[in-house]
Each structure stands twice: as structure tokens, then as C-alpha cells.
Image: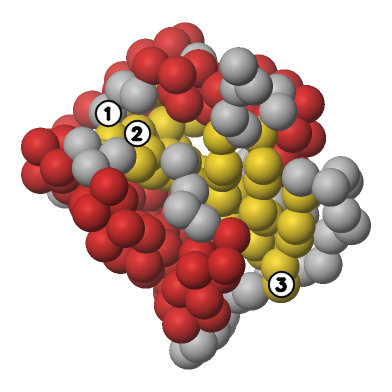
């Protein structure tokens, strides 16, 4: 009997983690639809790429049409993300973190959810960050948007699992991509390591995965210190 290809959707697939994930899943005999705001070449017959910006007013409608044509999807991985260091004269860059990291992920899941509920199956993987525990002056939009991603999607995971839907929140530390803007980047992971963590999550379907553990412990300690600094004024 011929094995049926799994059908996946990757948002934020033109570079970084998303691009490498597309390549890995295609090599593992998935059919992949990639979406990002930048163009990207087609890798194989099992791959299509579509230029869509999660912040555009027509994103939900365009994604819905894509789902009708390319779906139903067994799994979707939300890799899109932005994060700029704080510049007080350019606070719109901090707002963009919420629009892409949080609201784009929410819109994507809401488009996919009706078909998944009807089929009683589906898996949504969203990339959050270990920065969801941090409070500090350097990148408030990024940190707060990732804290919201973690809180929202881990809570939603508990609500939708009775409908056969899994949600996995992957909290990564520094990954070797253009998003790693900090001058100090301890325990930085390679993109290949991040992709392996996503592949593992697609199999095991955890609600939360934090990697690497060394960075997770460091962020927990730093988060506690920051909380005490705030309490002490």
C-alpha cells in the first residue's frame, strides 16, 4: 500500500527556520505550502510558495482560499516573527511585533480551525520564545508579544484538544537567524537544531517544548531577578 503524503502549511517559509523546515519536510515526503511576505523559489513538485503578509487586511480571506485549494492540512507551523530593539522615536516597530508574532498566528489558527474541528484532527505549531519570561528595556514588543503567544496558545491548546486538535508552543532561545539581534547570544542553537525540535513536536504533539534547557534555566533566573527589581523599585 502506498503511504499517503502528509500535507503541511508553513507560515514564514522564505528564509531562516521556516525555509529549512520546508526543505526537511519535503525530504520526508510531505506536501508543503509555504507562505511569507517575500517570494521564494519552488523546491519540488510537492511544494508551492505564496506571497502573503500576515498583517495585510486581506490575509484571512487569501489564506482561506489557499486552504480550499491546497488543504486540508494535517499540520501548520507558524514561523513568522519580527522583533526590533527599542527605539523610542520608532515605537511602531514594537507594535509590529504584536501584529506579526501574536495576531498573525491567531488569524492563521482561526482560518484553519473550522476544517480541523469538522475532521476532528489537526496540529498547529507556533514558535514562541524563552524571552516570554523576560522584562527589560531593550525589546519590550518582542518579549511581550511572545509572552502573549505562550499564554494564549497554551490556554487554547487545553480548550481544543477535546475536538481532536493539538497545539504545540515551541519556546526557543537564540537561534542562528537574522532575528538574533542581541550583542550577547548565549547557548545559541543552529537552525538545524531548531528544525529538529519542530519535527519532533510534529510527532509527539506536546503543548510546550522549551529549548535549549540551559537557556530556559537562564531565562527563568533572569526573569525572577527582573521581577524583584521591579518590586523593589
Residue 137 spot, x, y in % from top left: 42, 54
Q: Which residue corresponds to mark 3? A: 51
Q: CA distance from mark 2 to mark 3?
A: 25 Å
Horizontal side of residue 169 vs 63, given as left or right:
left
Residue 109 spot, x, y in % from top left: 35, 58
Q: Residue at image x 46%, y 53%?
A: 72
Q: Residue at image x 66%, y 46%?
A: 32
Q: Are marks 2 and 3 in contact (CB under 8 Å)?
A: no
Residue 147 spot, x, y in % from top left: 30, 47
Q: Residue at image x 89%, y 57%?
A: 41
SS under mark 3: strand
Q: Are marks 1 and 2 in contact (CB under 8 Å)?
A: yes
Of the pair 114 and 138, the residue shown nearer to us: 114
Tell which circle, 1 or 3, labels the residue nearer the N-terminal end. Answer: 3
- Which image quarter is the N terminus in? top right
Q: Callout 2: 10 Å neighbours few (<14), some, many (20+)?
A: many
Q: Which residue corresponds to mark 1? A: 207
The numbered dot on residue 180 is: none
Tell which circle, 1 or 2, labels the residue nearer the N-terminal end. Answer: 2
SS under mark 1: loop
Amino acid at each position: 500500500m502506498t503511504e499517503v503524503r502528509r500535507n503541511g502549511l508553513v507560515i514564514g517559509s522564505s528564509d531562516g527556520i521556516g525555509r529549512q523546515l520546508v526543505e526537511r519536510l519535503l525530504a520526508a515526503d510531505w506536501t508543503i505550502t509555504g507562505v511569507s511576505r517575500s517570494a521564494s523559489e519552488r523546491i519540488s513538485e510537492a511544494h508551492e510558495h505564496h506571497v502573503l503578509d500576515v498583517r495585510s487586511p486581506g490575509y484571512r480571506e487569501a489564506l482561506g482560499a489557499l486552504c480550499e485549494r491546497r488543504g486540508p492540512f494535517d499540520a501548520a507551523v507558524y514561523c513568522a516573527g519580527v522583533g526590533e530593539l527599542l527605539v523610542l522615536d520608532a515605537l511602531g516597530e514594537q507594535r509590529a511585533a504584536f501584529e506579526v508574532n501574536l495576531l498573525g498566528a491567531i488569524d492563521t489558527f482561526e482560518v484553519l480551525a473550522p476544517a480541523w474541528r469538522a475532521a476532528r484532527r489537526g496540529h498547529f505549531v507556533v514558535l514562541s520564545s524563552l524571552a516570554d519570561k523576560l522584562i527589560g528595556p531593550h525589546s519590550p514588543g518582542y518579549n511581550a508579544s511572545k509572552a502573549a503567544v505562550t499564554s494564549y496558545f497554551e490556554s487554547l491548546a487545553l480548550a481544543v484538544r477535546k475536538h481532536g486538535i493539538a497545539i504545540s508552543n515551541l519556546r526557543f532561545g537564540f537561534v542562528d537567524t537574522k532575528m538574533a539581534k542581541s550583542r550577547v547570544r548565549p547557548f545559541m542553537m543552529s537552525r538545524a537544531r531548531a528544525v529538529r525540535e519542530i519535527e519532533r513536536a510534529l510527532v509527539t504533539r506536546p503543548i510546550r517544548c522549551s529549548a535549549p534547557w540551559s537557556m530556559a534555566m537562564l531565562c527563568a533566573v533572569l526573569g525572577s531577578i527582573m521581577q524583584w527589581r521591579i518590586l523593589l523599585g
